[in-house]
Image: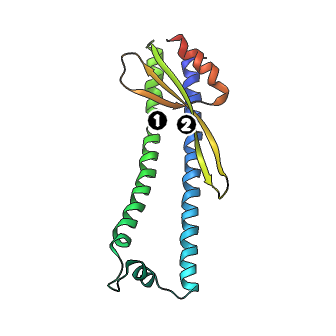
Amino acid sequence: MTTQELKAILLAEHKRDVKLMGIGYAIIAIGALILLGLIIWLFSLLNVSFSSVTEQFAGDAAGTPLYVKIVFPIACLIAAGYAWWNFRKIQKRPETIEEFVKYIENGKRVVTIRDSKIYRIKLPLIVVNYHTGVVQMFGVAFEGVSKAFLLPVPFAYTDQVKDLLNENS
């Protein structure tokens, strides 16, 4: 396997990883919208306003409690910010792949190779948690380089990539 083949394989797996992550976040967003719709439908079915429910939990008739006004929106913003940060981090991966291939072409010595599996789509059902969208990630560190590379590698090319990396160790 040449470094150009490795680069093409890593970029193809990167595209698959981005697609799986998008599907996972879309499932989360659809589930949240369905849950929100069910809550609104339940309130309208029972002829109950949201402020009367929060007054009962807060114990006062002064209005909506502070945690509803501040904590819930902040939690929603943090969750959306995490998803955005994750997508931005993954969108920079092609440059990381370029840098990784340059280190291999320059003959940098590989110090560690670590592989792990990440499940991009998780469905927490009542009895069973369903995990799918498996992406195999290789963590590679080069000698004299402070940056560690975490890159997706297809399962079919695991042995070939390890052989190529072991040539540089």
For disc 1, the marked residue is: 93
**Residue 109 vs residue 10: left or right?**
left
Rendering coords of residue 147 (x, y %)? 38, 26
Circle 2/circle 1 CB separation < 8 Å? yes
Determine the residue positioned at 58% across, 62% down. 31
The label shown at residue 47 is none
For disc 2, the marked residue is: 14
Q: Is residue 138 above or below residue 18?
A: above
Residue extending farthest to the front is 59
Viewer-closest of 12 and 64: 64
Viewer-closest of 71 and 148: 71
Q: Residues within 10 Å of mark 1 (few under 14, many from 20)?
A: some
Q: Is residue 53 above or below residue 156?
A: below
Viewer-closest of 65 and 117: 65
**Residue 119 vs residue 93: left or right?**
right
Q: Quadrant of residue 108?
A: top left
